Image: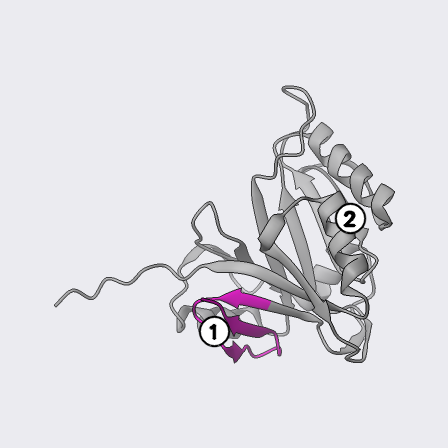
Amino acid sequence: MDTTTEQPTIDSVILEMPDPAIGASFYAAAFELGDKVRVRASEAPTNGFRGYILSLVVSQPSTVDSLVGAALDAGATTLKPAKKSFWGYGGVVQAPDGAIWKIATSAKKDTGPATREIDDFVILLGVDNVKATKQFYVDRGLTVAKSFGSKYVEFDAPSSSVKLALYGRRAAAKDAGVSPDGAGSHRIAIGSGIGPFADPDGFAWEAVA
């Protein structure tokens, strides 16, 4: 009997906000992610850190600067200015809808002209128990690509789809440059063929065709 299964994929991130028209305009101007980022109306109460970071991984510092600059021009605010660190180069901005975006590269020097090309789009969930949530997703068919104990987990994904990673909530907030405190709706849903369900931290997955 053939027991092979296709690796589940994440097709889109659905961001909830009071004015989706403003959100759609911002994301088209800032990051050009197309159908990978969708918006819809919601007035669900939320405050503080929503428990996730949306991360764009690019090839070089000038591309980080290009995307950060476009986001700021479109109405984002700076949480962490783009700068060099021991791991590479990156910055963090907050979109008008409240979503936190990290744009980063492992490279410390440019190897060509600046572009707007994005190599990976990663949903980083800040969770209460990394090991338990890792097992939750493994039980739903995801395959672990990288795992650092109770600190960080990254799951396999085809290059064309959105990737998923787990981080401790406090570590994620620190990485974003915000307080870990927050309550209410995450105001995000994950669109995938393996939904619908909610994970242990209340992150909602929705079925897509």
Earlier in the chain: of badge 2 and badge 1, it is 2
Answer few, some or many: residues within 10 Å of disc 1's Cα (few below 14, many 20 plus, some between 14 and 19).
some
Q: Is residue 88 left or right of residue 9?
A: right
Whether 197 is among the magenta residues is: yes
Instruction: Say which residue appears at 81% left-offset and 70% top-offset.
Output: 18
Q: Specify the quadrant of the image occupied by residue 191.
A: bottom right
Q: According to the image, label 1 marks what residue?
A: 195
Q: CA distance from mark 2 to mark 1?
A: 29 Å
Q: According to the image, label 2 marks what residue?
A: 92
**Mark 1 is on which residue type?**
Gly
Q: Is residue 55 left or right of residue 162?
A: right
Q: Is residue 134 above or below residue 199?
A: above
Q: Position of residue 2 (x, y in %)?
A: 16, 64
Disc count in the image? 2
Residue range in magenta is 190-209
In the rendered view of the protein, which quadrant contains the N terminus? Answer: bottom left
Q: Is residue 201 above or below residue 51?
A: below
Which residue is situated farthest in the top direction here? 112
Q: Is residue 207 above or below residue 59?
A: below
Q: Specify the quadrant of the image occupied by residue 20.
A: bottom right
Q: Is residue 152 left or right of residue 110?
A: left
Q: Position of residue 85 (x, y in %)?
A: 73, 37
